[in-house]
Structures are given as C-alpha cells and as structure tokens.
Image: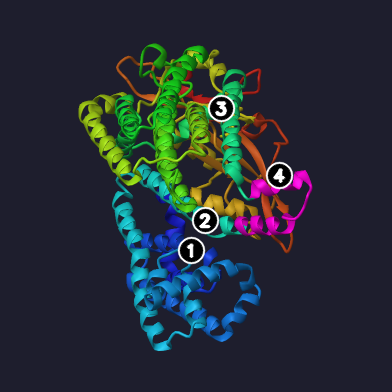
Amino acid sequence: MTSYLAPLVDFLGTHPGLAIGVVFLISLLEALFVVGLFMPSTVVLVGAGALIGSGTLSFWPIFLFTTLGAVVGDFMSYWIGHTYRERLKSIWPFSRYTFLIDSGQAFFARHGAKSIFIARFLPAIKSIVPGIAGMMGMNVKTFSIINTVSAFAWAIVHLAPGIIAGRGLSRYWQANPRLVMLMALVLVGLLAFWYLTKLVLILLLPRLNRLREHLISRADQSQNRAVKFGISILKNETGLVASMTWSIAIVGLFVGFVAILLNVLFDPQLSAADSAISRFVQSLRNTTADEVMVFVTMMGDSRVLTVLSLALIVWILFHRHWKIAASVTLAIASSTVFVPLMKTLVHRARPTALYTGAESFSFPSGHATHSAVIFGIIAVLLAHNLRIRARLSVYFAALALIGSIALSRVYVGAHWPSDVLAGVLFGLSIVAALAYFLRNRTLHLQGPLLSAMLIFVFLAALAVNYDQNALKWTKAYAYRPIALSVPFEEWINGGWQALPDRRVTFEGDAGEKLDIQTAVPIADLKTRLSQLGWNEDTYSAFSRFLETTLPSNQPLSDRATLARYNEGQAPIVVMTRAPAEDSPKRLVLRLWSTINQIGSQIARDTSTTPILVGSISTETLEPLALGFADIESIPLSEPVSAVLQPLGGGTELTKKIMPTGTILIYQRKHSQ
C-alpha cells in the first residue's frame, strides 16, 4: 500500500497548508446555498480524517478550519436568503431549484430554529435551510449560536470515522499491505456509491418528477391517442409505469444473462478477461480479508438461505396471502432447479476444485443466484408499501448484500467473475417477474415485524452454519498459488512455447507480443540492464496514474511509464532507456511473473527461479497545447533482439533467439 499512497501522503505531509485550505474550502462550499448539493464533502473529510489518524496531518488545524468553513458557508447562505428573500426563487441559478427551496421552507416551518442543527446532517437540505432561515427573518444571534454549535458537531462526525480508519490502516501498513489496499479500495467504492446515490435522490428524481408534471400539463388537453397514451404513462394510471418498469427489467436482466452465457460458450475473450480479473483479485488476498470473505460467502450458503426462505413463506401463509406464497415458492424453486441444470449443461470448470457432482461446475454461481432471488424477493415484499425513497433504500441495501456475496465468491476462488454476474442477473430477473406479479396487489405483511423476524432467523441460521462449518470452508477456500516446476532443459527445448505469447488485458483482449522469457533472478537481471544504460521505473501506482492521466509539460525522462497489466498483474520489473541522447522517445521493458518456475538441476537443492515474460515498447509524447503533452505508446521500430543485442555478451547471462523471435535469457551456469 505504501507504493500506492506514499506520494500523496508525503506531499500533504510537507504541504499541510494545502490540506487546511482544501478542507476549509470544501466545508464552506458544502454549506453554501444550493452549491453544497454538488460537493463531495464526506469523501474529502473522511480522507482528511484518515491522514490525521495515520499521523500525516495534525488534528486541531484540520478540525478548526473544517468547522470554520462550515460556519462561514452557513453564514453566507443565511446572508443570501436574508438579502433576496422571496426574490431568490427568480434569480439564476436558484430559480432552477425552487422545489428544494420549497422543501426547505416546509422543513423550517415544521422544526423551527432547531432545523439549523438537524439539517446540517441531512444531505438533501443541509445547504438550503440556512438560506431559508435568512428568508424567514430568523434572528442573527440565534442563528449564529446554533450554526457554530452544529458546525463543531458536524466536523467531528465527518472527521472521526476517517481518524479511526486512518489509525487502523497505519497499524496494518507495514504488517499487511495487501489488506490495507483492499480496505482502501472498498472504502473508496462505498464513498463513491454513497455520493452518486445522493446525487440521484436529491437532484435526478425531483427533476424527473418536475419534467413529468410539465409534460402532463402541456399535453393534458390533447385528443391524439398516442399523446393520451403517453399521458397515462406519465400519470401512472392503473400502475402502468410500474408494469412497464418491471417488464423492461425482466427482459433486460434475462437478456444480460443470455449474453453472458453465449460469451462463455463461444467467446474465448471472456475466459481471458475472467482469468485476468480473478488473478488481480487473488493478488489482494490476505489472512484477515480471507476470514471476512469466508463469513460473507457463508451468508449465501444453502443452509442459511433455505431456513430464511421457509421462514418467509410461513409468514406469508400465516397472513393468508396464498397466491403470493405460491409465487414466492415457485420463484425460489425455479432457481433451485435451474442452477444445477445449467451447471451440468455448460460444464464449465471452477477456478478451484471445491465440490462434487453438478456443483463441481462453475456456471452460473449458485450462491449469487440464490442470494439474488431470496434477498431480492424479501426486498420487494418489504418495499411494496413504502414511498419511493424508502423503497430505493431497501433495494440498495439488498443489492449491497447480494453484491457482497457475489464478490466473495470471486475472492475465495470459487467462481469466475462472469459466473457470479450471470447468477445475479438471472436471479434478479426472477425477482423482477415476481415484482410484476405483485405490482397492483395490496399486501398486509406487517413490514417492521417481518423485517425483525427475518433478521433474527438470518442471523441465527448464519451463526449455526458458521459455528459448524467455518473451519471446513476456511481450509477449502484457502489461497493456494499455483506454481509449475519446469526442468531447465524442457523449457529451453520447447517448453517456452507453452507460455503466453501475448499480453492479456482486463477486458480479455490481446495486447502487445511477449517477445521475452527469462529465468534470471530479478536482482541479477536489473544489475546487468543497469550496466547497459537501463533505468528502473520506481514510480508508485498512484503516481503512475496521475502522471499518465493528466497532461504535463515535464520532459519524457521525468515522467512515469504507462500502466500495463497482464492477466490482472502489474509488471514486477519496469525499466526504461532512451535510444539516443536527447531523444524524444524512450524504450520501456516490462516483465511479468508466470506460474512456471525453473527447478534446480541438483537433487538436494530445492530452490526455484520464476520464469518471467516480457515485452519492449516505445513511448513518446503527443503534443496537446501550451507545451503540455500526453504519453503515447507506439510500435517498436526494430526487433527486440536488436534492442537486447548487448545483453549476455561477455557476462554470465546467455540469450537464445527462437525462430518465432522470442528471446530466452538465462544464466550461463544452466547451459553447462
């Protein structure tokens, strides 16, 4: 993880004033009237808290300027509202958000002065209510006191989780960097998901509703049949919108499943992409995350889901919804029959041998399919009588649980990514079909009690399952890196042809040709290349991302090389060399590890040397404007053998050029 975050941490550590300015500005803008709706303040402040927890930044300056920014932002919003009053609704850009101003006025009228404190923690109206307080003529002194107190509480609430996370990450930093990387990726993903969800709920849904009302008002008097049909959809007469939505969902989800199935059967590119993504995920594995992921994957075990399904069906029967109980039973039974049938027909091998019979095959994932069906059905039933926002919250929670179980199957090596995606799509298509059936029905299932009962049954079944089978599955899902021992003579005399001859991207596409294979220890190879004028590229992944994504006016020699992955793995060696002095181009040599290893020729020596595959490419600068340029990769203008011609001459290294152009580089002692 150090290689990913060290540059950013070091930069902020040496420029704390910049970090203080950022948190002040983001806190101010977050509280500014309407503008705050678009500010990712939570993401920034949690990140700042993490840097405090890791010891990079000091707590008090960040805390005080975060608070100060929030206070100033609210005061500016108050001043805007106090100055323009009702005219605010006719002034751009506020005129475009009158629906939010109306919501803020209703909230302020309902809660009075305490709405200033409450709204600070509500994403939908936190940047609106201070301005409303000014519009409604709230006393400045009262506003100032509540504003300041709420700003202190808000700063603590936003910084504290990051501080705790930062302290935990810093403690694991050296001991388990892969765990830190995985946790950081999960944290970033959750924050991004939360921010996008906020934008959808706050901005997109109200705008769509306003557009719907506008279209209805304009076309309500029309006698045209097509227009009338359109109005009936917009008015959602007889639940037409729900019917169309669920119908489209059924077709779309099932078509997605069929598309993946066809690609699994007929497109080798998907298998290559599956392998690349799986290897990348496996590279993140560590003991702590293994324990968490085994627990998560056991949530989708048949023992747990069967008990949960029975409890749900019994509850529905108890409330005398006979048809719904039959429909739920049919939906669950259909997935139970479908999964083993498809596994047997497709006959796709798992990444790791775990089961016997039909379950020994991989497509589709049973855990992903059954979890999608059962948790999806529960979500549809619980959300049936709720308002749109509460309904979406239930759906998002169910999708998060389904997604976690699906991800765990890839993590523990039980399935390929396409297996779990296909399982989720098919399972959700069944859920959509059930939702279509329920769309116009009235349910009396006592939602709160049903939720409590299902949570209790789920946790109890999970606890029993984990207690009885945790050790078994922890051993079964343990990470076992594959290593194939290849005798040196076998490799040199034809075994090299079994190694990949093209780089494989995350999408499963074929990249540049892998013209190099070497069985030389990395340290020895770096030493020899350094003697020949090659320089190691030591940029971190984070710096590499910034350097190659953002245009720069730096010379090519001072910039990182382009990121290139092979089957989900980053290169373990990256070295560069300019073909000539002051050249506008540079040569880039990349080497990736393989599962093949050269075994020792001596019986008592069990040491091995991994076989690396690699390529050489050319990078240059593509001019943009004002002296800025992007890095661009172009084809090599000469054979790789010519570039590596000096390698091996008069040293302990030997190179052998094969008829295909592939170069084998090995230590001379092997050939003796």
Q: Position of residue 283 (x, y in %)?
A: 42, 35
Q: What residue type is disc 4 on?
A: Phe
How far apart marks 1 and 3 lie (CA) works out to 36 Å
For mark 3, does the 10 Å Cα neighbourhood hold few (<14), some (14 to 19), or many (20 or more) residues?
many
Callout 2–callout 1 Cβ contact below 8 Å: yes
User: Could you tell me what secondary structure mostly forms the magenta stretch?
Assistant: helix
Across and down, in percent, residue 213 comes to: 65, 58
Question: Residue at horizontal 53%, vertical 46%?
Answer: 537
Above or below 9: residue 156:
below
Circle nearer the N terminus (2, 1): 1
Q: Label 3 belongs to which residue?
A: 257
The magenta segment is 208-234
Q: Position of residue 591 (x, y in %)?
A: 53, 34
The residue to which callout 4 is attached is 229
Q: Which mark is residue 611?
A: none
Frontmost residue, 633 versus 601: 633
For disc 1, the marked residue is 124
Separation of marks 2 and 4 at Cα, in angstroms? 27 Å
Residue highlighted by disc 2: 201
* Residue type highlighted by circle 1: Ala
Three-letter code for the amino acid on which mark 3 is drawn: Phe
Query: Nearer the N terminus, badge 1 or badge 3?
Result: 1
